[in-house]
Image: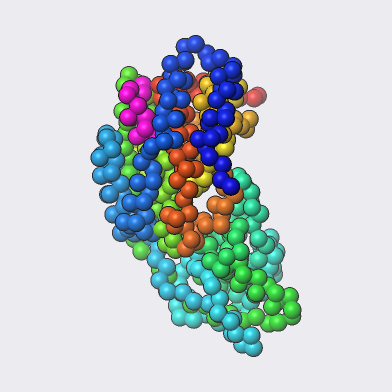
Amino acid sequence: MRLSVRLLAASALALTLVGTPAFAQDAGTIQRAETLRDAALNQNIALDYLTQLTTRFGARPAGSKAEQDASAWAADYMRAQGFQNVRIEQFPLVGWERGEESGAIVGARPQRLVLAALGHSPGTNGVIEAEVVRFDSLEALNAAPAGSLAGKIAYVDAGQMVRMQDGSGYGPLTRIRGAGPGAAAAKGALAFIMRSVGSDEHRMPHTGTTRYVDGVVPLPGFALAAPDADTVSRLIAMGETVRLRLSSTAHVYETVSQNVIGDIVGRSRPNEIIVLGSHMDSWDLGTGAIDDGAGGAITLAAAKAIAEGGRRPARTIRVVLYGAEEVDQPTDTGNGGGAYLRGIGTAVERHIIAGESDFGADRVYSLGLPPGAQGSEFARAAAKVLYPIGVLSSNQPELSGGADIGPLAAAGVPVFRLDQDGSRYFDLHHTADDTLDKIDPEQMSQNVAAWAGLIWLIADSEVDFRAMRPAAQP
């Protein structure tokens, strides 16, 4: 049974009332944050935005016409919601189109396979048919003798992704997707295949970007749906020689992507900027509802809730819908995040803090603040506002932020995180099942409430997260 966030808020009310008193100078700010939180639980624009985005434009691959059209529409949506200084910031991009693809086991045990080309992999230039050599890790592939895979297909099956609330099972496997094609090419392989990086056992492959090596992706790469990966691995374990036939017409092309930027301009300190980030692009198999249309919906709705709260905050709240988060590029330009950092120049010094929503729309359960903020008066105020909707404070400082705001973090901007429950995220991530019906509106509203309450505390205060940083150790 799904836990109602409204019921949780009601049941925690008594605890909130008897909790540690807020520091007096921020009593009014805290009270308004609580009011914004409760209002966002009951009404916000997140579902409207996400419904329109995914229905009007569907999948939004980086650099595609769909991404460009969706960005133009989102800019108009922001203007209609009262955002100011709305603009679209373009940057060059190498785009990628999937084309047509197929895979099958051939020979004595013929079977069709369900697979997906990895993002930015080249096409097969016809049909590749070759024997499969299986490895149980990227390290094992890297340890193969030079030339040992000449004329063969390298296959890495490192087992099923471990399901974790915080998504920590993803990292150990996604590096296979990034580095696998290059490692296979170095050993002479014709192509690379891998078990999809996902926590599900559905017959739906998970795509995702692979990595350029010296300006190119060296050979075609594919992800097998989990049941098909099981089949190939079992046949090999039975002593069978497995031959695959692979084809793909994938190709790259020159294009542009873009960031969409809009502000709720601050009342008294408009040059102090708080960035709320997400990304507009998605993979092409689904409609990008959880990855990451939901993040844009949550951050837009939170900023809108603050703007409608009856009083503008002191600082400027900036919503950025970043372009091209999903794809690697031949050069390390940082994609949308890098383009934004280059565009603001020295104004990065006036960026107070940044946060990113890019983990679906299930409930927020934890708040991570920048180094030094743990245990501060601000942290206690945030706990008072967020605990009633089920958000606990983390003792771990947030350092990196995420792919989109990572360049800001690297440039010295403090970052925070509102951790979402990712228990089912990687069942859907980068698959055809990433669609609007997977969104739980009540949990998404809890996200909006958490963002609105927290951001008000930051935006209408003088808190300086840079000054809270611990002194560097000698």
Q: Position of residue 162 (x, y in %)?
A: 66, 54
Look at the image and tell me in which quarter the C terminus lies.
Answer: top right
Q: In this view, does 270 lie above or below 432?
A: above
The residue drawn where x is 68% and y is 68% is: 135
Asked whether residue 312 is drawn in magenta, I would say: yes
Q: In this view, does 369 lie above or below 299?
A: above
The residue drawn where x is 60% and y is 72% is: 228
Asked whether residue 386 is drawn in magenta, I would say: no
Q: Where is residue 136 in the image (x, y as percent from the top left)?
A: 70, 65
Instruction: Work out whether residue 365 can be spotted.
Output: yes
Q: Is 406 in front, or is 262?
A: 262
Residue 181 as seen in the image, left or right of residue 148: left
Instruction: Work out whether residue 403 can be spotted.
Output: no
The residue drawn where x is 61% and y is 66% is: 226
The residue drawn where x is 57% and y is 22% is: 14
Q: What are the residue bounds of the magenta stretch? A: 301-314
Q: Where is residue 239 in the image (x, y as percent from the top left)?
A: 74, 80
Q: Is residue 166 above or below residue 186?
A: above
